[in-house]
Amino acid sequence: MAQVRIRLLGALKERTNGKQEVWVEARSWSEALRALLASYPQLSVAVDDRGRPRPGFLVFVDGVDCRLLDEGAPANEVDLLPVNHGGVEFRFVTWNDVEEAIRRIADKIQASSFKPEVIVGVMRGGIIPGRLLADRLGIEDIGVIEVKLYISAGQRGERPYLRQPLTLSIKDKRVLLVDDVSDSGLTLQFSVQALSLYMPAEIKTATLYIKPWTKYVPDYYAEQVNEWVIFPWETEEFEREYRTHR
């Protein structure tokens, strides 16, 4: 086992008697968070029993969004923080909001010189926006891709791998890659890298929303937001995973 430093940001330190830094022994980042939860059960508002962040909270493992990592990936440093350091703020997006965002993105694409031939949605968040954009733009070819960040045992290097490969050909075609939100931006960044292996003619990216701190600004987006966005297709998941643990 290795020593893992966990940093608690924002108001979370109030749940650990003012401690902003906790050291635990663990083989992976999720095991480290489970160890943290065992010592501070009051942090169950932010971490579930599997050692994963609950909705409204973020975990960065050595600077990488944990959503891009396998649960068994090793870690030196783990940051746990609410979406907004002063407290969690949510935006509950309606279907009308989604349709308006899709319209705005489609208008931007149609006003540009880019004419996509294929739409690829990033699992899971990009599937529904990708389908709606395809309908709006009159595109028949739709695919999905899922990217994970692989860190081999004993190595600190990072490289993406395809958890679900693309099943349709995009060789020499213009591709629009779609996701719901560009938060850290790492998902889009790695997805573009993975998609480029299929030798498309061109790749452009689109998300419904972006966060001010994203490291990857897509080519097309509808709006910049600060809140944690809850989409209409994930409200039940939100109810299960957050409200019952408040």
Image (tube, grey):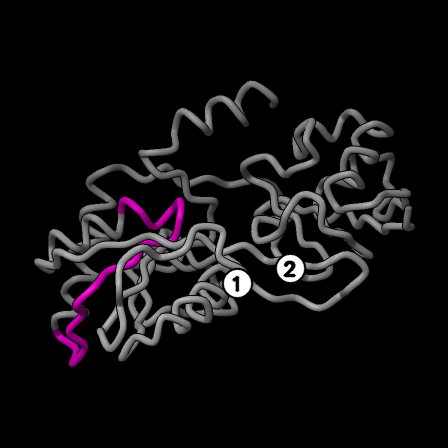
Residue at 17% in and 57% down = 141
Q: Earlier in the sequence, mark 2 or mark 1?
A: 2
Image mark for residue 64: 2
Q: Quadrant of the rendered structure where residue 27 is?
A: top right
Residue at the farthest top position: 244
Q: Quadrant of residue 46?
A: top right
The residue under the point 81% across, 60% down is 154
Q: Are marks 2 and 1 in contact (CB under 8 Å)?
A: yes
Within-10-Å neighbours for mark 1: few <14, some 14–19, many 20+ = some
Position of 58 relative to 17 (above/below): below
Residue 187 image point, x, y percent: 49, 59
Image point (66%, 29%), residue name: 48
Q: Position of residue 1 (x, y in %)?
A: 91, 46
Which label was assigned to residue 186? 1
In the image, 143 versus 68, the foreground residue is 143
Task: Report the front residue among 7 and 205.
Answer: 205
List x then y, in percent, for residue 235.
38, 29
Q: Secondary structure at mark 2?
A: strand
Q: Is residue 24 left or right of residue 159?
A: right
- In this picture, is 46 found above or below 244? below
Look at label 2 and name its amino acid.
Val
Above or below residue 98? Residue 157 is below
| Nearer to me, 205 or 82 | 205
Question: Residue at 59% of width from left, 34% of height from top?
Answer: 54
Residue 61 quadrant: bottom right
Q: How many marks?
A: 2
Q: Is residue 21 left or right of residue 65?
A: right
Magenta highlight on residue 25: no
Q: Indicate the quadrant containing the C terminus: top left, top right, bottom left or bottom right.
A: top right
Q: Position of residue 5 (x, y in %)?
A: 85, 51
* Residue range highlighted in magenta: 111-128
Q: Is residue 178 left or right of residue 47?
A: left
